[in-house]
Amino acid sequence: MFTAAVLFRGDRKAAAVLRTPSAPQRNLRARHVTVLTSILHISMLKRNYETAFHAYALLLRCKDADIKRVWDVGLEILRNIAPEKVVEFIQRLIAAYPTLSQAKQKNMTAEHFFPILIRQRISHGEFKEAFEELFDQLLVLPYSENPELHYYAGAIALHIALQPSTGDSERRDKLAYAKKAFDLMKAKGCGHWVPEDQLKEEE
């Protein structure tokens, strides 16, 4: 059974970084990790994601392998064998890693993973879920300082506003929110294109 929890840790380059074991069997352990890493590499290249899943899961159990940064390998595997688990996987990463002020690496923070979650939601047409998550996070630092997130919020709010099923009251609210979000994006130095003509429908 494929679960997001099984693929929760990883290494960006799909290669296990060995810790220095104190046990005399460190060479045997190192060879074991090397073999599993090779299987993972080959399986990913061949797009044999089920084999890659099993190799990845075994690597997670190796005490001498530090693969907590191979999160994107786990993400790619899940996208191909259990896409319904991807959101849960990213949410686990957001919950597990600290904010930028506490982190040692910029690509291992909740702020790094949150936009990935929003893009995943958008790619699957989950616009209302994405908007709700953005609405909450943009109320607090450091997310409120991120112009990319304001752009996503504006674009999603505008998309919802223009849907035929959206009521007049919600439509006005979403258009107003979109305009505010785009203004904040510009104020923070982001130059993404803004659909001004559609926003004028608010007036």
Image (cartoon, helix red, strand yellow):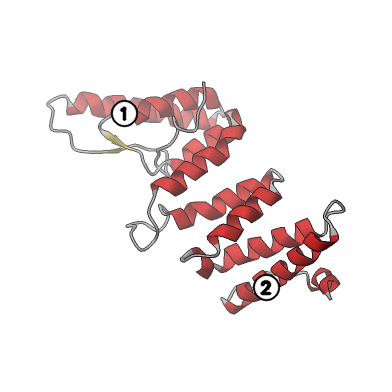
Instruction: Residue at 55% x, 63% y: name it.
Output: 138
| In the displayed structure image, the side of residue 54 where residue 172 appears, left or right | right
Looking at the rendered structure, the kind of residue marked 2 is Lys
| In the displayed structure image, the side of residue 176 where residue 20 appears, left or right | left
Q: Is residue 170 placed above or below 127 in the rendered structure?
A: below
Q: Dot 2 lies on which element?
A: helix
Quick one: which residue is furthest to the front in this view?
A: 169
Which label number is shown at residue 197? none
Residue 125 place in picture, x, y as percent: 72, 45
Give the residue number, with chain letter if any, for mark 1.
33
The crowding category of the residue bearing disc 1, from other C-alpha atoms within 10 Å (few below 14, some 14 to 19, many at least 20), is many
Q: Are marks 1 and 2 in contact (CB under 8 Å)?
A: no
| Residue 168, quarter of picture | bottom right
On-image quarter of the C terminus: bottom right
**Of 122 and 70, the residue lying toward us:** 122
The CA distance from mark 1 to mark 2 is 51 Å
**Of 18 and 85, the residue lying toward us:** 85
Q: Is residue 185 placed above or below 171 in the rendered structure?
A: below
Instruction: Residue at 81% x, 62% y: name it.
Output: 169
Instruction: Residue at 60% x, 52% y: name it.
Output: 118
Looking at the rendered structure, the kind of residue marked 1 is Val
Instruction: Residue at 36% x, 29% y: name it.
Output: 59
The crowding category of the residue bearing disc 2, from other C-alpha atoms within 10 Å (few below 14, some 14 to 19, many at least 20), is some
Quick one: which residue is furthest to the right in this view?
A: 164
Which label number is shown at residue 180? 2
Q: Is residue 23 placed above or below 91 in the rendered structure?
A: above
Q: Dot 1 lies on which element?
A: helix
